[in-house]
Image: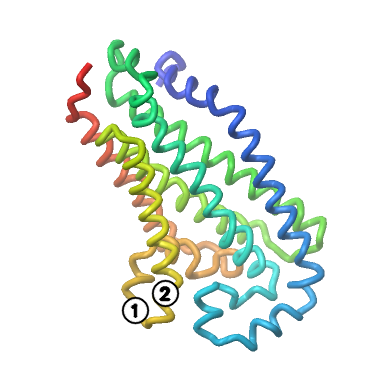
Amino acid sequence: MGAERLAVFRSVLRDQRRSLLLWSVALTAVCAMYLSFYPSMGGTGEMQTLIDQLPEDLVAALGYEDIGTAGGWLSSTVYGLLGPPLLLVFAIGLGGRLIAGQEEDGSLELEYAAPITRDRIFLERWMALFVTVFLLVAVVTAACALLAVALDMDIGTGRLLAGSSGLFLFTLGFGTIALAVGAALGRRSVAVGTAAGLAVLAFLFDALGPVVEADWMTAVSPFSWYMAEVPLVNGFDLRGLGLLALIPIVSAAAGLLLFRRRDLVV
């Protein structure tokens, strides 16, 4: 695909430059804040001792089983507690805005009227979503890698990449759902609400499944696919990554098909 065929993609990235910068600074600050606590809390063994005194079901629901290790600390904080929700806010908001939001505010009318195929409108916007999410996850990964070295945390590169791969696919999946629903219905609120609602269910199913002994809840939860095997401790979980990859692939395919068929009234 030549550069001239990526005009939509480049336009979206250009519009997101300021947002990407601000989000990068915010995510780096979150990483710095939580990793800086590890030497005085997680690294001393006191946190693990405290966790061992809590009910097993509660510890499992919170995902704190390995919090006394460097990988467990990262999993429980940056990669489990704050990273996913923050990145989901960005990805779902952007996904809902890329087609449905711009259609509602009238900024997409010129593209609809121009000799540009619907496939290009959808796919180049999805490519922009892919790249922006990738860049933000790369910022998180780089910040954690540098801070881990500075704080002498035992986090191998492979395990860090394993956690980041899952975080990227998890975030991209729900961002793509927002994009697909918005493309299919043309309503940003519905797109954002649908993707956000499914993300909340993923978190709830992962947390409640072990507590109520409902294995089916964790089996269908994308958050469980992402974190169940604790990739920052145990390395790559190929099955989990494969399931996570299905979400953006299937969502993008369904969204494109429905977008092709929708009456745009242009």
SS of the residue at dot 2? Answer: helix
Disc 1: which residue? 214
Mark 1 is surrounded, within 10 Å at the Cα level, by few (under 14), some (14 to 19) or many (20 or more) other residues, namely: few
Amino acid on which disc 1 is placed: Ala
The residue at the point 52 percent across, 62 percent down is 236
Disc 2: which residue? 208
The residue at the point 64 percent across, 50 percent down is 141
Q: Quadrant of residue 182?
A: top left
Q: Position of residue 96 (x, y in %)?
A: 39, 37
**Label 1 or label 2, whichever comes before in sequence order:** 2
Amino acid on which disc 2 is placed: Leu
The residue at the point 52 percent across, 53 percent down is 85
Left or right of 201 on screen, residue 255: left
216 or 181, which is in the foreground? Answer: 181
The residue at the point 74 percent across, 72 percent down is 42
Q: Are marks 1 and 2 in contact (CB under 8 Å)?
A: yes
Mark 1 and mark 2: span between their CA atoms?
8 Å
Q: Position of residue 89 (x, y in %)?
A: 50, 46
Mark 2 is surrounded, within 10 Å at the Cα level, by few (under 14), some (14 to 19) or many (20 or more) other residues, namely: some
Q: Position of residue 46 (x, y in %)?
A: 76, 80
Q: Position of residue 116 (x, y in %)?
A: 30, 16
Q: Which mark is residue 232?
A: none
Left or right of 166 on screen, residue 174: left
Q: Quadrant of residue 119?
A: top left
Q: Quadrant of the C terminus?
A: top left
